[in-house]
Image (cartoon, rainbow, N blue to C red):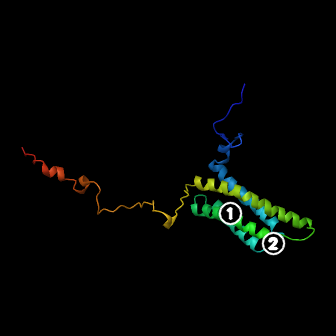
Amino acid sequence: MGRRRLRSHALWPWGHWAPTAFIFQPRKLRQSIKAIVLVHWLLTTWGCLIFSNSYAWANFTVLALGVWAIAQRDSLDAIIMFLVGLAVTILLDIIYISIFYPHGGSLTDTQRFSTGMAIFSLLLKPLSCLFVYHMYRERGGEFILNIGSFGPSQERSAYQTIDTQEDPALAHPYADLESKPAARPY
């Protein structure tokens, strides 16, 4: 007998089955954002043993946005700001680690541990961004990229002008009634 495949599983690119329905359920999303904030808080705390000041400010500010996203479950602003903050701190962490990495012949155990946790946090952030993006989509958000002056605007307003009518029949709705003879009263 062959293996039974469940419908709630999706095929990953490398051919294994993964339970994506379990990961992206709305109740699980709330718990996963808490896990994301908790893991990054712990790794940032350990990373601050050697990388202080700007590294700490950037990462703890983003974690505060994550707490805001947890507190206001229906807020699109909170989750998108947390997502953008995570994406920005990916770049900032690369800069901080490359500038403030302790150069020297031998590193102490604390320096190695702190640097390792900061790098591990950096490596987890793209995955966290993916999960937070799915949470953003679950909350009803849409990612629309507007390229502005580089091309024609495809944006349509919810408002329509009433001055111009495209259909002539709509311009004068009683035109066909005026051309018919009036009904005789009996």
**In the drawing, does residue 129 fall left or right of residue 114?**
left
Identify which residue is drawn at 18% across, 53% down.
175
Q: Amino acid at mark 2?
A: Phe
Q: Find residue 123 and report its image quarter.
A: bottom right
Quadrant showing the N terminus = top right
Residue 27, compared with residue 108, is above or below; it is above
* Residue at x 68%, y 43% (from the top left corner): 13
Say which element carries label 2.
Answer: helix
Nearest the camera: 98 or 74?
98
Point 67% across, 57% down: residue: 129
The residue tagged 1 is 86
Q: Residue at image x 70%, y 57%?
A: 126
The quadrant in which residue 39 appears is: bottom right
Q: Residues within 10 Å of mark 2 (few under 14, many from 20)?
A: few
Q: Which of label 2 and label 1 is nearer to you?
A: 2
- The image quadrant that residue 46 belongs to is bottom right
Report the label total.
Answer: 2
| Residue 43, position as x, y percentages in the image | 79, 62
Task: Give the SS element for disc 1.
Answer: helix
Tag 1: amino acid? Leu
